[in-house]
Amino acid sequence: MEDKKILAPDELKERAMRFFDRYGKDLEQIRQLLSIRLNQLALAHTIANNLPPEAIIVSTRVKTLKSFLKKLEKKGWPQFYYPTEVAQDLIGARVVCWFIDDCIGIKELVESSIHLKISGDIEDYISTPKLSGYRSIHLSANVGYDSVQRSGEDVAITNEDMICEIQIRTKLQDAWGDVTHEFHYKAKNVGVDNKFYEKILSEVSNRLASEDQSLLTLREAYQELADDKLRNKTREGFRDEGGSA
């Protein structure tokens, strides 16, 4: 069998540009599907645990062509036919929970979903944080969708799936990630690596992890409030029409 042609970086760039130009709308629609699936799971979890809807927030995004090309460069321009062969996060989601217990609950709901099929191993950096202090649960899941295929004048709809990355973390862990992103990724990409700052960031992460445990008391308070409203048949939500608690 003849070896496949090895493409140069410029050729890989052109291949990526053609993919994003052709499938950009598909990626956006799959992102919307992923958002719907995860928001439904979040709603189910908050209702089952007597928590306000705001206790779990889902955000989704499609990786831009520019960001994808940067990832290729960082990886040394690996060969691919479809971008998903070298990047499983073309479509990504972040699920941010007020309380750490709900991170585990959402992970278990994703695992049990008939609409999201887990692919590969789940990386639990909450149970086992990175040395930097990074904490989050990472998993990849296939999202099913209807793909429109055209052949001449004929149009067919086929069942396809797309690999997506899902990150689950607490609000405090998310705040730590936002603050440290510049240092951990952008600074290191230009050769900045300071062990002293790394140690400080890790210590901050440890203190926030302790606060995450303390916040579980507040979670119990929310649940008790919900139980009281249910008993008195007064529960209509955690906020009135004016938006106050």
Image (tube, rainbow, N blue to C red):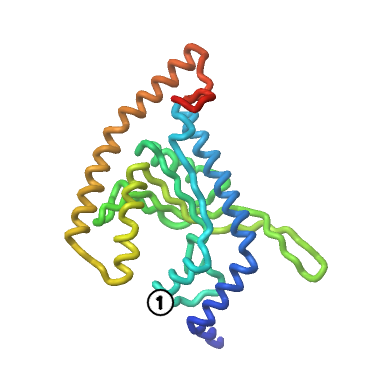
Question: What residue occupies the far left of the structure in this picture?
Answer: 196
Decide: few, some or many residues near mark 1? Use Cα within 10 Å; few <14, some 14-19, many ≥20. few
User: Residue at the location (68% across, 59% down)?
Assistant: 147
Q: Position of residue 70 (x, y in %)?
A: 44, 70
Q: What is the number of callouts on the image?
A: 1
Name the residue tied to disc 1.
Answer: 76
- Location of the C terminus by quadrant is top left
Indicate left or right for 216 with 241 as reference. Answer: left
In the figure, 81 relative to 206: above or below?
A: below
* Lateral position of residue 128 relative to residue 121, left or right: left
| Residue furthest out toward the bottom | 2
Q: In front here: 193 or 8?
A: 193
The image shows residue 213 at horizontal and vertical percentages of 28, 36
Q: Is residue 186 left or right of residue 41?
A: left
Tell me the quadrant of the picture where the N terminus can be found.
bottom right
Q: In the rendering, at what x and y percent does residue 137 appear? A: 38, 49
Q: Residue at x 48, y 81 (%)?
A: 9
Q: Secondary structure at mark 1?
A: loop
Outermost residue, front side:
242
Residue at the limit of the structure toward the right, as seen here: 153
Task: Say which residue appears at 25% left-offset and 56% top-offset.
Answer: 132
Query: Of 141 and 167, which appears nearest the observer?
Result: 167
Q: Nearer the viewer, residue 114 or 25?
A: 25
Image location (x, y in percent) of residue 8: 49, 84
Name the residue located 60 percent from the left edge and 70 percent from the top edge: 19
Tell me the kind of residue under disc 1: Gly
